[in-house]
Image (tube, grey):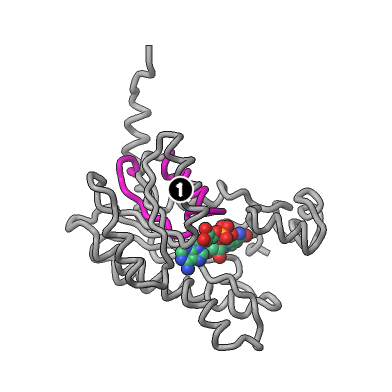
Amino acid sequence: MGHRKGAGDDMNTLERGLAGRTAVVTGGAQGIGAAVVARLCAEGCRVLVLDKSAEHGRSAVKDWREHGHEVALAVGDVVDEDAVRAAFAGVPAGWPAPTLLVNLAAGFVFKGLDATPQDWQAALAPTIVGLSLVTREFVAALPPDAAGAAIVNMASISAHIAQSGYLTYNTGKSAVLGFTRCAAQELAPRGVRVNSVSPGTVWNANNERYHREALGLDRATAEAAPEHGGKFLLRRFADPEEIAAPIAFLLSAEAGFITGTDLPVDGGYLAV
Ligand SMILES: NC(=O)c1ccc[n+]([C@@H]2O[C@H](COP(=O)([O-])OP(=O)(O)OC[C@H]3O[C@@H](n4cnc5c(N)ncnc54)[C@H](O)[C@@H]3O)[C@@H](O)[C@H]2O)c1
């Protein structure tokens, strides 16, 4: 006999309110974004991934589909207005209009005051202009009754602190906080909530490579070092799934009265 639906199941579905909805995830082909896609699929969402990496996007989407999930890929750069428009126009027929958006694509440029105009462009265009273009298109494509629609933007602990050599990156991430507050105000009349998350260091492929190649450290050694994992109260890095879970919460009906704010997901880093 299969699983029988009980009161708890209904309550769960009712409270979270994510099942059956369409989500758009930018930067969903790898890293934290891929964990977000997997989490939303597990919540019963259909997910459109907008990512500039055709290679990683195709391989991730193939894998998710083989696991029975409904995932579509739009290959494009979030700073390309036409690509963003085409991505939303390409939501597969039969899917509901997207009412969930996770903006993760960002400019990874780490420069100080020596940054050139080109550095600033590369740092801020994806993080802010791309965020704005995708959000604008998402809002334009919302159904008339957008009840329950929600957006989560990716900030960082870097949005809250000074870090040597991070001027360009931290300026972009700080701007994500301002964007989030203003977008929350603008979209509140339609019932659309907008929040951000601020993770600490997440152990993804990039960070693994950086710690191994630049510092000669594996995860356990890096986490034990006071200047790396040791700077977090929990004395470790996060797994991507630990960022995906609070993002799913902020998108869900359980966070129905939360908007215009930032949730640190940082192992206690900002607490001290
Ligand atoms: N990894 C961390 O420790 C950490 C900590 C805090 C915040 N963040 C933020 O989380 C987000 C994801 O980071 P990650 O470490 O998982 O990165 P990642 O490099 O593993 O993945 C980023 C994905 O975004 C895509 N992408 C990048 N620029 C794009 C663009 N202009 N248009 C479309 N797609 C684009 C890439 O192709 C890639 O698939 C970023 O906003 C990052 O700033 C990461």
- Disc 1 residue crowd, few under 14, some 14–19, many 20+, Cα 10 Å: many
Q: Quadrant of residue 108?
A: bottom right
Q: Position of residue 125 (x, y in %)?
A: 47, 77
Q: Residue at x 63, y 53 (%)?
A: 204
Residue 173 versus residue 251 in the image, above or below: below
Q: Position of residue 161 (x, y in %)?
A: 63, 73
Q: Position of residue 184 (x, y in %)?
A: 35, 67
In the orientation shown, which residue stands out farthest toward the left?
144
Residue 200 versus residue 21 in the image, above or below: below
Which of the two residues, 63 or 177, is positioned nearer the viewer here? 63
Quadrant where the C terminus sits is bottom right
Q: Residue at x 45, y 34 (%)?
A: 67
Quadrant where the N terminus sits is top left
Q: Is residue 37 left or right of residue 109?
A: left
Q: Is residue 218 left or right of residue 43?
A: right
Report ligand 1 position as a quadrant: bottom right
Magenta part of the chain = 17-42
Which of the two residues, 86 or 217, is positioned nearer the viewer here? 86
Q: Is residue 143 left or right of residue 159?
A: left
- Give amino acid for label 1: Val
Q: Is residue 182 left or right of residue 269?
A: left
* Element carrying mark 1: helix
Residue 230 versus residue 171 in the image, above or below: above
